Image (tube, grey):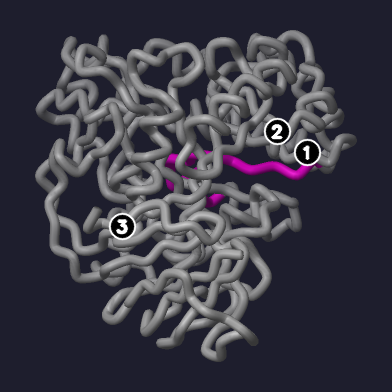
């Protein structure tokens, strides 16, 4: 029975209103005690966390590991190492792998690869429709039994609203959460930038805000009618934040997240055709960026995710519109989130909640907290690390980040998963 002591750290867990210096005792993979050692406790390992902050392990609601199907970009092995080195203890993968996660055999394949190679917990969303084609409903109950924690059609359209309603109703009947990335395909198709003056000046086809809000409005109506529990992911606009706020006020059982890069970048960042800033949904106006920040600050947006999408170098070396969208974002999830607190835009409690207990609750996990008895998934971070992002500290196979050269304060010093020390910065 392994026993680990984290001594002299500042424990911070807003979920249980914990914010003070204390010793943390871990026994048999679980948090055993705070302050007072359990009987017969004898640490096999001690971590001196003096001057460091101890938080629950980070839970990332959206990360593409590229396996199976695109192993030339990344693998479960490479990306889970990168996650652990970034303080992330749980990753949730969308179903748009190759093959699509639309049957139990694919879930079993990924679970097998994860068991042999993973350095953090890997969860999966099953496909809402077969092959993500938006025509036939997937075997949702079979996917649930196989271990999927929710259902999604990623950014693939379900054009027939009757099919959408039946999918949500079936998911509700199974007690599964649907994860929705709102996108009206006919309005966004072929676009690569926010529709506005910047895109016009650069000669890029724009994606209007309505591509998000029209899809969001339709989904909200069907969610209200079917009673399904829904999570809206990767929102990008002020209008969407307002719609989510209104729907929550009306009592709808929904949650929402934003990707970390949307909180720090806007359409001005593509002005030099910087393909590292080619993302979907696109970087929108400064007004939208500020509204997303306020959405996190006031709790309208529950969580911050990485929306990790590693690419090989060739994917970003064409003209902007021809490049593949997405950011390699595991290394920057924690420092970008805490940067909002450093800038006094959002308080630190809200930030920590948005990357730990809130996403854990959305996924219905017994993690994301330092509560006694829960799994000992822990991140020990240094708030005064002062480091600069470059290729040497992006441990993902994908180095495609618009934050290269940025200076950050916060860094994960130690990552513990199930009571086992997986990563130490000094390693």
User: Against 178, is 203 above or below?
Assistant: above
How far apart marks 2 and 1 lie (CA) works out to 9 Å
> How many numbered circles are shown?
3
Name the residue furthest bottom. Answer: 36
- Magenta-tinted stretch: 228-242
Mark positioned earlier in the residue sequence (3 or 2) = 2
Q: Measured from the top left, where is residue 275 in percent x and y?
A: 20, 23
Q: Which residue is mark 2?
A: 148
Mark 2 and mark 1 lie on one chain; the one further toward the N terminus is: 2
What residue is shown at x 84% (from left), y 37% (from top)?
A: 172
Q: Is residue 64 above or below residue 14?
A: above
Q: Position of residue 180 (x, y in %)?
A: 61, 33
Give the residue drawn at x 36%, y 31%. Answer: 78
Per the image, the residue denoted by label 3 is: 424
Q: Residue at x 77, y 17 (%)?
A: 138
Comparing 246 with 269, the one in front is 269
Callout 1: SS: loop
Element class at badge 3:
strand
Which mark sits nearer the N-terminus, 1 or 3?
1
Residue at 30% from the left image edge and 21% from the top image edge: 311
Residue 357 appears in the rendering: no
Image position of 367 (left or right of 150):
left
Q: Percent from the top left, x then y, of residue 265?
A: 25, 44
Nearest-to-viewer mark from 3 and 2: 3
Q: Is residue 236 magenta?
A: yes
- Mark 2 vs 1: CB contact within 8 A: yes
Decide which of 295, 413 is in the foreground and name it. 413
Instruction: In the rendered structure, find residue 176 and report the number of the disc placed on it.
Output: 1
């Amino acid at each position: 029975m392994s026993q680990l002591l984290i001594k002299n750290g500042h424990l911070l867990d807003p979920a249980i209103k914990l914010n003070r210096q204390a010793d943390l005792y871990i026994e048999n993979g679980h948090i055993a005690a705070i302050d007072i050692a359990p009987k017969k406790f004898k640490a096999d390992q001690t971590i001196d966390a003096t001057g460091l902050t101890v938080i629950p392990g980070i839970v990332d609601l959206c990360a593409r590991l590229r396996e199976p199907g695109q192993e030339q970009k990344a693998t479960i092995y490479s990306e889970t190492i990168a996650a652990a080195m970034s303080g992330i203890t749980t990753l949730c993968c969308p179903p748009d792998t190759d093959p699509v996660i639309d049957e139990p055999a694919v879930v079993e394949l990924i679970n097998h690869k994860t068991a042999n190679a993973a350095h953090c917990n890997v969860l999966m969303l099953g496909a809402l429709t077969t092959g993500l084609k938006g025509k036939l409903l997937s075997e949702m109950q079979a996917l649930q039994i196989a271990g999927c924690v929710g259902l999604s059609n990623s950014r693939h359209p379900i054009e027939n609203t009757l099919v959408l309603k039946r999918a949500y109703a079936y998911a509700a009947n199974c007690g599964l959460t649907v994860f929705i990335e709102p996108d009206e395909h006919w309005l966004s198709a072929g676009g690569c930038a926010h529709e506005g003056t910047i895109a016009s000046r650069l000669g890029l086809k724009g994606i209007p805000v309505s591509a998000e809000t029209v899809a969001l409005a339709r989904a909200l109506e069907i969610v209200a009618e079917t009673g399904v529990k829904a999570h809206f992911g990767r929102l990008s606009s002020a209008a969407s934040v307002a719609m989510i706020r209104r729907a929550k006020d009306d009592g709808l059982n929904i949650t929402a997240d934003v990707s970390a890069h949307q909180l720090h970048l806007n359409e001005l960042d593509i002005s030099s055709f910087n393909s590292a800033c080619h993302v979907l949904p696109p970087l929108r106006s400064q007004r939208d960026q500020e509204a997303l920040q306020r959405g996190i600050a006031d709790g309208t947006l529950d969580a911050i995710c990485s929306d990790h999408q590693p690419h090989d170098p060739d994917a970003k070396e064409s003209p902007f519109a021809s490049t593949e969208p997405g950011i390699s974002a595991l290394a920057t999830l924690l420092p970008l989130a805490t940067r909002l607190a450093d800038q006094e835009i959002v308080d630190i409690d809200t930030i920590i909640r948005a990357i730990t207990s809130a996403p854990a609750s959305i996924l219905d996990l017994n993690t994301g907290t330092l509560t006694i008895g829960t799994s000992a998934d822990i991140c020990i971070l240094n708030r005064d690390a002062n480091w600069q992002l470059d290729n040497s500290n992006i441990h993902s196979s994908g180095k495609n980040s618009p934050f290269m050269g940025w200076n950050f304060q916060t860094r994960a010093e130690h990552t513990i998963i199930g009571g086992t020390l997986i990563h130490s910065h000094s390693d």
